[in-house]
Amino acid sequence: MGPSTILGRSNLHVPRMGVGAMTWGDPQGLARLHPAKTAYGGSHGIEEEKRALEVSITAGVNLFDTAAMYSMGAAERRLGELARGRDVIIATKYPSGFSFHAKDFPKELEMTLARLGRDSIDLYQHHYPNSRVSIPTLMNFVADAVEAGKVKTVGVSNYSAVQMREAHAALAKRGIPLASNQVEYSLLQRKPEVDGVLDACRELGITLIAYTPLAGGMLTGKYSAQRRPGGFFRRVLPRYNRKVLDAIQPVIELLKSIGEKYSKTPSQIALRWLIENPVVLPIPGAKNGKQAMDNAEALKFSLTAEEVNALSQATLAWRV
């Protein structure tokens, strides 16, 4: 089994890395147009998802992250189906749509439990803060679900430092820790270091779950101004334009040179840079067994403090 840690100050034991299952499942109708599908390509099918799950569990990576919103519930259904009877930690997010109010929480929870085929959720995260939703009110509903045994651990996602503090304080009144905040964080997206989120995580004992830890494939070394990514959204998003692809080449070269020392790929070095921070838990996506196996390699070695620092220095431009 791979190394494990405690999520924040909760009682949940988790591996040092998870698996993002955003593109899993078999969406129907309009759900096929989900941005994740159009940007990153759809699922590689149930057999490959099953292999990704098996390979990950074998490597000690048994934390899988999904959301009610992904493919309109199809991702939750698929993860629930594949995880049945397995020693798997399921993290998911609510709500399933954009017209959400705090009072809708109990209904959202029941729908997710039904889709997953479970009677409790290991980590339940509010997907996006919303000016219509009072954080203290919402956290009181979540605390009720914890007391009822339906939610084991509480997290949030895309919360600012101020919003995290508000959620943390509301839960603390009920004697419940805020375990995690899931935000985008990678060598090419270092905003959490400057917007107060990482500092608040350290101060309050909250784990930062890093989504898009390979910057949408930018840190794999696969892309350059000559070899641009496929997928409609990836072609039009500014982060994939030629100028950006040129700018990241020195970072890719550094990842490759460090990787040679350990016989590891640029992706594995980039993931390891995050894992070396005890507060951070990356969740790279895995659409198939090979991706899952590649990701799990990041748990099998360590970077030196000098290497971590060299990568941090080389990507200072992405802190802004």
Image (cartoon, grey):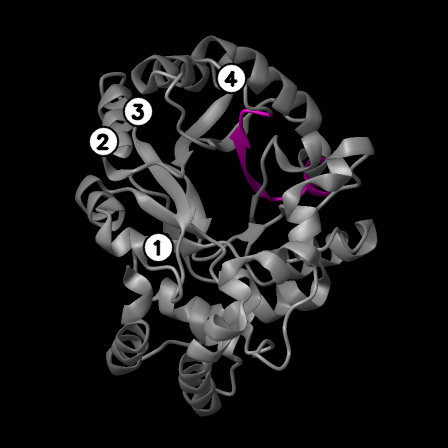
Q: Is residue 83 visible?
A: yes
**Sooner in the amino-acid sequence: mark 2 or mark 1:** 2
Q: Which residue lies furthest to the top in this view?
A: 103
Q: How far is mark 1 from mark 3, CA to CA?
A: 21 Å
Instruction: Indicate which label's residue lies in the foreground, 3 or 2.
Output: 2
Q: Is mark 1 on a helix, strand or loop?
A: strand
Disc number placed over residue 100 in the picture, else none: 4
Q: Is mark 4 on a helix, strand or loop?
A: loop
Q: What residue type is labelled 1?
A: Val
Disc number placed over residue 165 in the picture, else none: 2
Instruction: Indicate which label's residue lies in the foreground, 4 or 1.
Output: 4
Q: Mark 3 points at which residue?
A: 176
- Asked if the residue at tag 3 contacts the one at tag 4, i.e. Cβ–Cβ closer than 8 Å, the answer is no
Q: What stretch is highlighted in magenta?
A: 79-96
At x 30% / y 38%, what residue is drawn? 160
Quadrant of residue 308 in the image? bottom left
Report the side of 38 relative to 170 (left or right).
Answer: right
Q: How far is mark 4 from mark 3, CA to CA?
A: 23 Å
Q: How far is mark 2 from mark 4, CA to CA?
A: 21 Å
Q: How far is mark 3 from mark 2, CA to CA?
A: 13 Å
**Sooner in the amino-acid sequence: mark 4 or mark 1:** 4
Q: Which amino acid does label 3 sit on?
A: Ile
Disc number placed over residue 280 in the picture, else none: 1
Q: What element carries label 2?
A: helix
Q: How crowded is mark 1: few (under 14 residues within 10 Å), some or many (20 or more)?
A: many
Q: How far is mark 4 from mark 1, CA to CA?
A: 29 Å
Q: How far is mark 2 from mark 1, CA to CA?
A: 18 Å
